[in-house]
Image (cartoon, grey):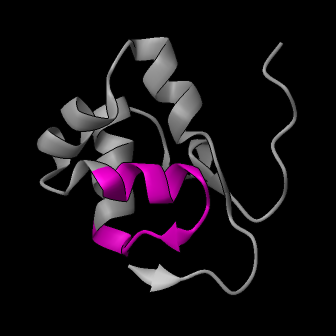
């Protein structure tokens, strides 16, 4: 993980809530510490490419559905 220098927006928390997956469950599935998920959700750290791809595979969505350089518009 690298320190964030410019904002990268993500929908990890939204996807987790939608799928009813806890931070710990997601972390265990991805092989990271549960605090890493919190850091990612808050935008405090950027994931490695491998972790971003693992997140996309876990949620079965394209990486672009999780991360963006622009703010996401509301889903509803």
Tell me, yes or no, whether the highlighted magenta stretch contains residue 39.
yes
Which quarter of the figure has residue 74? top right
- The residue at the far front in this view is 35
Q: Which residue is drawn at 58% across and 27% down?
A: 14
Q: Which of 57 and 17 is in front in this view?
A: 17
Q: In this view, does 64 lie above or below 28?
A: below
Q: Residue at x 69, y 66 (%)?
A: 8
Quadrant assignment for the N terminus: bottom left
Q: In this view, does 50 lie to the left or right of 48?
A: left
Tell me, yes or no, whether the highlighted magenta stretch contains residue 28.
no
Q: Which residue is drawn at 36% across and 31% down?
A: 60
Q: Position of residue 56 (x, y in %)?
A: 39, 45
Q: Which residue is drawn at 32% across and 25% down?
A: 22
Q: In this view, does 21 lie to the left or right of 74?
A: left
Q: Where is residue 38 in the image (x, y as percent from the top left)?
A: 44, 50
Q: Is residue 18 left or right of residue 28?
A: right
Quadrant assignment for the C terminus: top right
Q: What is the number of callouts on the image?
A: 0
Q: In this view, does 22 lie above or below 12?
A: above
Q: Is residue 6 left or right of residue 41?
A: right
In the image, which residues are magenta? 35-50
Q: Where is residue 6 in the image (x, y as percent from the top left)?
A: 75, 81
Q: Is residue 11 above or below residue 76?
A: below
């Amino acid at each position: 993980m690298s320190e964030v220098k410019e904002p990268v927006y993500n929908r990890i928390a939204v996807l987790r809530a939608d799928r009813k997956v806890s931070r710990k469950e997601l972390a265990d599935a991805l092989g990271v510490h549960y605090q890493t998920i919190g850091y990612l959700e808050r935008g405090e750290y950027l994931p490695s490419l491998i972790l971003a791809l693992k997140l996309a595979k876990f949620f079965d969505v394209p990486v672009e559905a999780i991360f963006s350089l622009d703010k996401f518009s509301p889903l509803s």
